[in-house]
Amino acid sequence: MAIPSVLFVICVSLYRAHGIRLFTKSRCLLPTLPCGRAQRCSGLAMLDGDIRVGDQVVAANDWNSSSPDYGIVRAQSYELRRVYYQGLAADGQVSRVDVSSLEATAPTGCAGFTKYCALYSPRYHAKTAPVIVRPQEVLVVTVQDEVAASAWLALPGLVWVALALFIYNYGEANGGAFAVFTKASSTSAPSYF
């Protein structure tokens, strides 16, 4: 059957067109829970690299969702506008140091600073500013990784479609259940029994 070759072509096409790797080791950006279990980002959360400023991300949970203009709604996409560390500098002033990605470690001189990110959605924040949250509160994953994780949900459907097509082709080849619906010739009447 041609199903394995079709799946291979889909995987190769996704990799070449979008850089999506469906067979990568799953890892999450977040620390473990107090009970010792690792937190899940969203779906399979297959991250190939950093989540950089400017990437489209999907929020895995709500944060102040009762007022979406000032919060984050789960399963919605947002643009990652800014990632920075904030804390008290040596001179006692509040300091903000920008970094390029969510996986970036604190720059030198920023020990004890807290990481924040600014998320923006034109749907929710057109009249307000981007929402500033800690990455641990929102649990973001890139849209590309979310689509790749969700693509696996389509595989059982493809198996059922292939099975239905196989049964239909078998019936057509052997005069099966669908032979009744064929056009009868003008010289003989169709026999239904």
Image: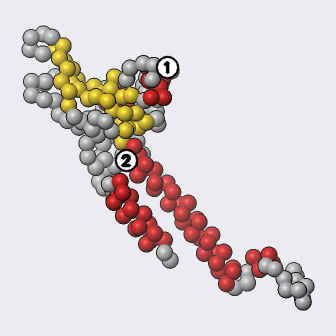
Residue designated by label 2? 145
Q: Position of residue 15 (x, y in %)?
A: 34, 59
**Label 2 to label 1: alpha-carbon separation:** 27 Å
Residue type, mark 2 in image: Asp
The circle drawn on residue 56 is none
**Which numbered disc flags the more N-terminal residue, 2 or 1?**
1
Depth check, front residue: 127 or 132: 127
Is residue 33 shown left or right of residue 9? left
Residue visible at 26% across and 29% down in the picture: 83
The circle drawn on residue 67 is 1
Identify the secondary structure beneath mark 1.
Answer: loop
Is residue 150 shown left or right of residue 31? right
The answer to whether residue 155 is above or below residue 101 is below
Asked whether the residues under the numbered discs 2 and 1 touch, taking CB atoms below 8 Å apart as contact, a structural biologist would say: no
> Most extreme residue toward the bottom, as rendered?
187
Depth check, front residue: 47 or 53: 53
Q: Position of residue 28 (x, y in %)?
A: 30, 42
The answer to whether residue 129 is above or below residue 175 is above
Q: Position of residue 39 (x, y in %)?
A: 34, 38
Residue type, mark 1 in image: Ser
The answer to whether residue 70 is above or below residue 83 is above
Residue visible at 41% across and 37% down in the picture: 58
Residue visible at 36% across and 64% down in the picture: 12
Visual colour scheme:
secondary structure
Can you see residue 29?
A: no
Can you see residue 61?
A: yes
